[in-house]
Image (tube, coloured by chain):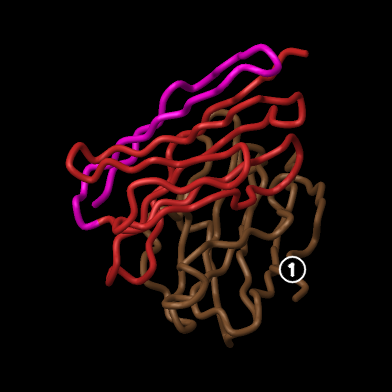
Chain colours: A red, B brown
Amino acid sequence: GENVEQHPSTLSVQEGDSAVIKCTYSDSASNYFPWYKQELGKRPQLIIDIRSNVGEKKDQRIAVTLNKTAKHFSLHITETQPEDSAVYFCAASIPNTGNQFYFGTGTSLTVIP
Amino acid sequence: DAGVIQSPRHEVTEMGQEVTLRCKPISGHNSLFWYRQTMMRGLELLIYFNNNVPIDDSGMPEDRFSAKMPNASFSTLKIQPSEPRDSAVYFCASSSQGKSGNTIYFGEGSWLTVV
């Protein structure tokens, strides 16, 4: 099956700086890569996603890049704010496998005011 | 849309008691997932259903855990008997294969404490 690795496990940045979280996957058949944000005591919520036919996607301060050849994808948060502090999860999904999702182990991001 | 609805939101029970967690997926979604989240193990997939049929239950810890999906709008996760190590947050999630980009939507979670 698919194996998704996520780094770093913890990340601290100063407010206003950028944060980058990286994930790798093992199965080249994976074609959908969502990112979730989980605030303390709350559920994971989708913040951005990308499909394998696209190399980059942006939504305001958040962007995701995908390198299919290297089998890795990254989340970029610019101009970080304290409310960006949360745990972020990446995931990969393989088509025709019954909608199975494979999650990374999460990155705890702290934005220091 | 009300989103994925889980109940109870919080439960405290004594070791040995039966625990039943309930989930109502988003209407029209045909995939349902049960996850367990702890500090030590992170987010673990326990079981998932497609069109009410269990597809992969390899994540179910042991025979004390069972899950059912009798219809498209309801699923249960049962623990019998419960043990303190079962204390965790249990998330139900749903997805529509082929729609909405296959995105998984999570419920608010059921916070279980077994004492």
Magenta span has A12?
yes
- Identified at 54% across, 19% down, the residue is A10
Q: In the displayed structure, would residue B21 be above or below residue A27?
A: below
Percent x, y of residue A40: 74, 34
Magenta span has A39?
no
- Identified at 17% across, 42% down, the residue is A69
Number of numbered discs: 1
Q: In the displayed structure, would residue B51 be above or below residue A82?
A: below
Quarter of the image that includes the C terminus of chain A: top right
Label 1: how many residues lie within 10 Å, few (<14), some (14-19) or many (20+)? many
Q: Quadrant of residue B6?
A: bottom right
Identify the amino acid type marked 1.
Ile
Percent x, y of residue A22: 40, 30
> Residue beneath label 1, please?
B5
Residue range in magenta is A1-29
Give me the chain letter of mark 1: B
On the picture, is A48 further left or further right than A112?
A: left
